[in-house]
Amino acid sequence: MSTMKAVLLDRSHQPPALRLTEEYPRPHLVPGKLLVKVKAFAVNHADVMTRKGSGAKGPAPIADIIGIELIGLVVGVSSELERARDVSEQRTGPQGARYRSGDIVAGVMGGLGRFCNGSYSEYALLDPDCVSAPLPVGDAAQISTSTLISLAAIPATFLAAYGVLVTSLQIQPEDTLLVHGASSSIGMATASLAKHLYNVKKVVGTTRDAGKAARLKTAGFDEVLVRPHQDDSSIEEQAKSIKEAAEEMAGFTAQVDLIGADHIPVALACARSPGGARVCQAGMLAGAYFCTEPFSPMAIPVGVYLCGYSSSFADHLNPLRELVTAVLQKKLPTNVDKVFRIEDVPQAHEYYERSTRCGKVVCLID
Ligand SMILES: NC(=O)c1ccc[n+]([C@@H]2O[C@H](COP(=O)([O-])OP(=O)(O)OC[C@H]3O[C@@H](n4cnc5c(N)ncnc54)[C@H](OP(=O)(O)O)[C@@H]3O)[C@@H](O)[C@H]2O)c1
């Protein structure tokens, strides 16, 4: 039996612990699947929550190997898949993409790392519905480490940011955008896309840590507002400084809230009203998926539109080609904070959880 390096989620510990092994059975190609040699992956909020045994609502994850996204080299395409797939080179989405051994692809979604083994390993067996079309990176054999690091920072984070900005908020250059939770990976990616790809007039973000301002401006924020630490302050106190900035701008026309359901009133108070402002609730950094206090839709100001975004919808992978192209053309920063190797995943998780981290944490595999 051939084996591979993998980082296992050992559930015999409470909370579960990450454990490196070199003896996990290497998956082999089965009908309908792609076999991918993992080159790099990023650490995500979801991985940390799974490791801690907490997470979004729904059934408990069961995979041995966590990791919700990867960049990898296709090393096997099942014959069923080859026959079933549309040959068109024009298709950029996962449906209909044609794969060959040697393609560089991104893997994300489809229960990856939760209900089937994920990316913290040398090889992954993937359902084509969670694999991007081959990425436009030229000769895979020539791909540089720095390109792999940039690519690894894109899939889950930039696709979510794209979904929030483009699909949900329908962002426009004349918008004034406020991101609550600016220093999160998705917050930074949102600013990078808004400023560098969609030329949004004004991009403002909130953080609890003034020390991150310079880094956030590099990502694409024009202005950074420092708000009080949530644990020590009421919603009203948190809203105060943000609302002052909102008043200067006569209310923001677009907002992304990544703090959580209980923070929605703050975002609504910062919206331009009336005037077609949009607020997208897309994260739960403070832990609240549901509102603690009863929330009435009548509390939504006149002419303000409140929506959500979840990356689990079908066309989710389609924008990857555009995003990767922009990154390779150096039009879009990927906001990588630190790079580790797979052998150091426990340290990567420890670093990820530091409050001073600002950006993506990427792991490389030989
Ligand atoms: N909608 C979707 O499709 C989608 C997809 C993926 C993830 N998400 C969600 O989006 C959110 C962001 O994910 P991420 O991976 O980008 O996060 P992340 O990088 O782990 O965010 C870390 C930052 O969040 C801020 N933060 C942490 N706890 C906080 C709290 N209690 N209140 C306010 N800010 C807090 C801190 O910033 P400061 O200390 O600088 O304030 C921290 O540096 C998560 O809730 C994640 O579950 C949504």
Image (cartoon, helix red, strand yellow):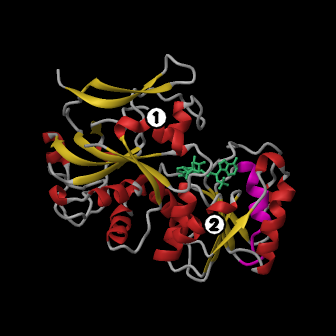
Say above or below: 16 vs 326: above
Locate residue 205, reporting x and y percent: 65, 66
Say above or below: 254 vs 199: above
Q: Which quadrant of the view contains residue 62?
A: top left
Residue located beneath label 2 in the image = 213
Q: Quadrant of the C terminus?
A: top left
Q: Which residues are magenta?
A: 261-275
Locate residue 80, reporting x and y percent: 16, 40
Q: In the structure shown, which secondary structural element does the residue marked by tag 2 occupy?
A: helix
Q: Mark 1 packing: few (<14 Cα in 10 Å), some, or many (20+)?
A: some
Residue in the image at 74% along x and 56% along y: 264
Residue 254 in view: yes
> In this image, 291 relative to 221: left or right?
right
Residue in the image at 40% along x and 42% along y: 110
Locate residue 319, reporting x and y percent: 39, 63
Query: Is residue 271 rendered magenta in the image?
Result: yes
